[in-house]
Image (tube, helix red, strand yellow):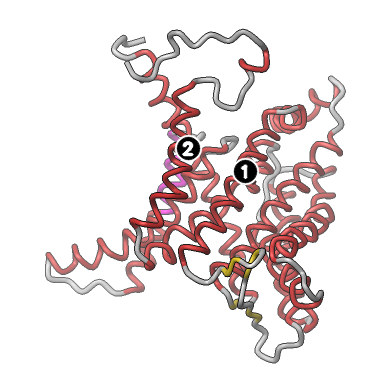
Amino acid sequence: MFYRENGQFKTSYRADQQIFPIAQDKWAILAIVAFAAVGIPFLVDEYLFRAILIPFLILSMAALGVNILVGYCGQISLGSGAFMAVGAYMAYNTYIRIDGMPLIVALLSGGFFATLVGLVFGIPSLRVKGLYLAVATLAAQFFCDWAFLRIGWFTNNNASGSVSVSNLNVLGWAIDTPVEKYLFCLGFLVVFGVLAKNLVRGAIGREWMAIRDMDVAAAVIGIRPMYAKLSAFAVSSFIIGVAGGLWGFVHLGSWEPAAFSIDRSFQLLFMVIIGGMGSIMGSFFGAAFIVVLPIFLNQLLPGLGALVGLSVSTAAVSHTEFMIFGALIVWFLIVEPHGLAKLWSIGKQKLRIWPFPH
């Protein structure tokens, strides 16, 4: 009853092609963003900012990048953690080696260098696909792990192999408290979310989806596979690289190569699979699920064990988390390949026709 299009008339192509053609969607998204920027800082404590909200924002942004490559262009990638690492380390080197370098420019420079690395390791996509492409992108992960661990220039010749940043500020605004870090990451996510949504709605997005569905047919109708695939790698790597810079600068503050291991690549891929491939909203659903589930299990399993008189160890909780992740991925691939975003879309469609059955 409340989610209807009655009375919403479109009088131009531009009005019909806007991001949110249904007014309720537009106002709901604006309300959520306004509440996230104004309401949450007054309602949430420091623990939730550090443990849930800041990681959720950054990983959502990284999942956007992975979804562009995997979900929209159909190019499987297991090197997302490497692109995050490139973004973090190059942003760090840009930030400390150039006097007066603005923080935002340093983070964007990390995305630029991640784009270059993504293009290099995206070249095999012009010849191979599927499992072979996954192995090629996996090479990026191992190569970057080795480079950041063994080449001292990346860590400013730090003997411990770790790097750290402090005293972050943007135009005199010091980013020290969890609230300030949260708002800083929220601004990045909103900007990149809007950009990603417009990209996939435009001509380049249609080219990506044509390559995903059938690259031979796409080439026949005039789409250049080389341009489409490499542009997907470039855009994806840039977004993931900026997210990696935020992860290192804002969330961690101090990190080493293990922070961007292959586990991070699998985590981002799981977000896309569970949230929904080929869906901007699915990136947010997947990131929320992956971030919240471990914390939920850490609270739930020890409590259940205490009720039945059993002691649940930390290792048991960790192993249970892996088993649940694996089971959910198999379930989504079999039952609902389009993930949580598809379930959300079905729910919206039912609201549009309620109370009628079809």
Which element is circle 1 on? helix
Q: Is residue 52 a member of the stretch shown in magenta?
A: no
Q: Position of residue 147 (x, y in %)?
A: 76, 75
- 64 or 31, which is in the foreground? 31
Please determine whether, in this image, residue 331 is positioned above or below residue 103: above
The magenta span reads 325-335
Residue at the spot 61% in from the left edge and 69% down from the top edge:
248
* Mark 2 element type: helix
| Residue marked by disc 1 | 67
Residue named by callout 2: 339
Residue 194 lies in what quarter of the image?
Answer: top right
Residue 268 position in % (x across, y down): 57, 54
331 magenta-colored: yes
Asked whether residue 10 is in view, the answer is yes
Left or right for 259, reference 293:
right
Type of the residue with mark 2: Gly
The rendered magenta stretch, by its main secondary structure, is classed as helix
Q: Residue at the spot x=23%, y=68% of the render?
A: 302
Tag 1: Cα neighbours inside 10 Å, few (<14), some, or many (≥20)? many
Q: Position of residue 291 (x, y in %)?
A: 44, 57
Can you tell which of label 1 and label 2 is closer to the viewer?
1
Q: Quadrant of the N terminus?
A: top left
Give the image location of residue 356, x and y in percent.
Answer: 31, 9
Please tell me whether residue 268 is drawn above or below residue 71 in the rendered image: below
Q: Is residue 86 left or right of residue 45?
A: right
Seen from this angle, which residue lies furthest left? 308
Q: Residue furthest bottom?
A: 159
